[in-house]
Image (cartoon, coloured by chain):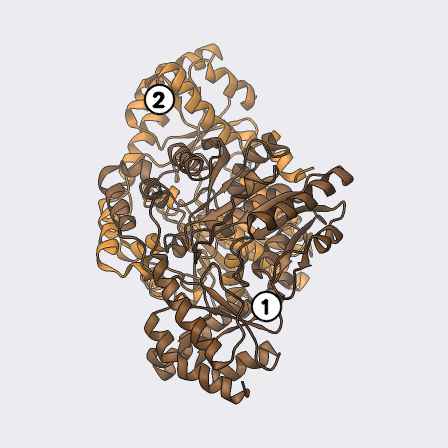
Chain colours: A brown, B orange
Amino acid sequence: MISETILNLNRNGSAIRAMFEEGAKMAKEFGKENVYDYSLGNPSVEPPKEVKEAMTAVLAEESPNSVHGYMNNAGYEDVRQAIAEHLNKEHGTAFSARNILMTVGAAGGLNVILKVLLNPGDEVMTFAPFFGEYRNYVTNFAGKLVTVPTDPDTFLPVAENLAAAITPKTKALIINNPNNPTVVVYSEEVIRKVAEVLEAKQKELGTSIYLIADEPYRELVYDGVTVPYLTKYYRNTIVGYSYSKSLSLPGERIGYLVMPDEIDDADEIIPGAAVANRVLGFVNAPSLIQRAIKRVLDSKVDVEIYNRNRELLLSKLTEYGYTCVKPQGAFYLFVKAPGGDDKAFVQAAKKYHLLLVAGSGFGGPGYLRIAYCVDYDMIVRSLPAFKSLAEDYGL
Amino acid sequence: MISETILNLNRNGSAIRAMFEEGAKMAKEFGKENVYDYSLGNPSVEPPKEVKEAMTAVLAEESPNSVHGYMNNAGYEDVRQAIAEHLNKEHGTAFSARNILMTVGAAGGLNVILKVLLNPGDEVMTFAPFFGEYRNYVTNFAGKLVTVPTDPDTFLPVAENLAAAITPKTKALIINNPNNPTVVVYSEEVIRKVAEVLEAKQKELGTSIYLIADEPYRELVYDGVTVPYLTKYYRNTIVGYSYSKSLSLPGERIGYLVMPDEIDDADEIIPGAAVANRVLGFVNAPSLIQRAIKRVLDSKVDVEIYNRNRELLLSKLTEYGYTCVKPQGAFYLFVKAPGGDDKAFVQAAKKYHLLLVAGSGFGGPGYLRIAYCVDYDMIVRSLPAFKSLAEDYGL
């Protein structure tokens, strides 16, 4: 008998990935033009041209054995120092290379820090709805994911719910800001309230509760919204970042962890994270892209392209009668499922070659996630399908 | 309290990595020219020039969103198909894309397949001396590493020892061929004997015992030795490969798993490995290097450069009175520690700025591992240090 965890995951795999693969099949059957795949957060905006230039320049200018060789498990020291200085400039922090660990994307970073923090049975909280992979990451280390309900109207944290979820076993709270799938951004005020609850509980219980800020969407915000940098509001904060969305490089698997000196047990956690990177089999973040990142720290994708998609979809879906959460960040819409049954609606949508993801997979039943990191033209072509579905449901 | 596993690893970390980092410090103090670092298997031979050409061409010719975007968690289908066909040509096998999963190096691949196979308490065997990271990889999934003693003179498997180590809990045997650190290559005859024991025990116990062939050194062999392709000798074989050594790309983290259709539970293991790649946080092997690999399947580093190092060191160390295992593959020498105490010898060697790794870290006390994937000139400069040490020990 192979791993029971894997057997279960084979049965009840990622709804997102299943839909993505169904989309590929439907595209073969009906033609790519006639399938409207809103399933996967796979960036459609091209990486900034500086990325290609930087990768080409690294290949041309730097020594091959150093570009492609082993380095410290934490990553190249000069790259980590450059990222630290970039963060300091942006956020007024005081990091150095020691505080940065280069990771295999944000997913790699989360696994590394959970490996470092968790003993079997430890609890990790997250606000629901939430990115479903958190459950797998926490389970990898025999931890228990505790989902904390948010305000059903705004999807913002509720202090009382958070306080009620904390036990002596609570090791961490994962915050995804901007949030996937609810697309809300937690403001300074929200973060201060969360920090207050955590501080009080740490004192009451005599424990350390780490706030893990998962921030792959930090740069994708709209309408002038800003995302607070959480290390400034709560001492025990660890940040996980990824270039997957900000530079449209999800396949390259490059990101980093920020572990400030002020966190409890920093002197074990910082070297421990390099060890975890090694023993989990990452060994180090891919090398060429590390060296290229150092050259493009000020670049990001053109967010206006996503914004244009967002505005079209939001206005049209609202016009057709759908109820959408106001999207402040990331590249998703979180929409109330007409009829209330998100899974049934997702099935009904397939008739119109429309691929959506049910909110149930994110602990948000009754909602749909629509990833609009797609071609504008596909959105235009898909509008009649959304309209017909709305009519079918009597909106 | 953070993870006890990590706290332990922080205390008793990788001897190899510790030595590598000590080497970097000594180089700062005494000058790079005066430190002889034989600690880490970090290739010194440059990647074949086709690698740079291929990466540059992929960047210039292919669509950025496809080069840097998400693909199936198993990797690009065309890359996997090309690798399958390359293996079929080399080994007369009959693989297709379905049998190949692109991984974050061999370390990533081993973690993926162990995640798929193991339930808590399952046992994984390996022949000692062995690559120390296997213990961490197996422990990641609450498995138990069982080390099987080899013949103390030849370091070859002993059938009786293998049979005695197998229990109803045995899920796999990891074979590293060519072996790190013992540098022996298991011949066809040796493999047939191992397969025979496994077959008999599978039948006796009614279990499936997977043979995991960890083959990062497959291409690095000398004196006309060949490495058998294990899927041809034992049905339940899974192969882990890495381009780290064959193309000198250890930092890029690129390799693959081969999961033949004939293995027990293939229909769960093959999709399960893609799921494991995702949930462990790898998500997929880095994308650009996947695309480049497809263009350089026939390339490999110039092994003659390592051979020249091997011959110089072997002849000189033998001349000075050291006893070396005959090295058939990889880029290490496995040498009897004069005086018998490998840890003491490693300490004594530091006086001469000579950085070696104690065999104890590999389950091979009484031996030293010397990684000769270094500049030839460094070997020449280091010879007086080896000579003085031999004299100190009365060789």
Q: What's under tag 2, amino acid-wise? A: Lys
Residue under numbered circle 2: B316
User: Which secondary structure lies at badge 2?
Assistant: helix
In the rendering, at what x and y percent does residue B198 appear?
A: 58, 56
Inspect this view and state whether residue B159 appears.
Answer: no
* Chain ID at mark 1: A
Q: Residue at x 52, y 61 (%)?
A: A183
Q: Is residue B64 placed above or below B149 in the rendered structure? A: below
The residue labelled by disc 1 is A361
Q: CA distance from mark 1 to mark 2?
A: 64 Å
Residue B23 pos. (x, y %): 43, 23
Q: Give the label on residue B230, or none.
A: none
For label 1, the SS is: helix
Q: Is residue A164 left or right of residue B388?
A: right
Tell me: residue A292, above or below residue A382.
Answer: above
Mark 1 Cα-neighbour bin, 10 Å: few <14, some 14–19, many ≥20: many
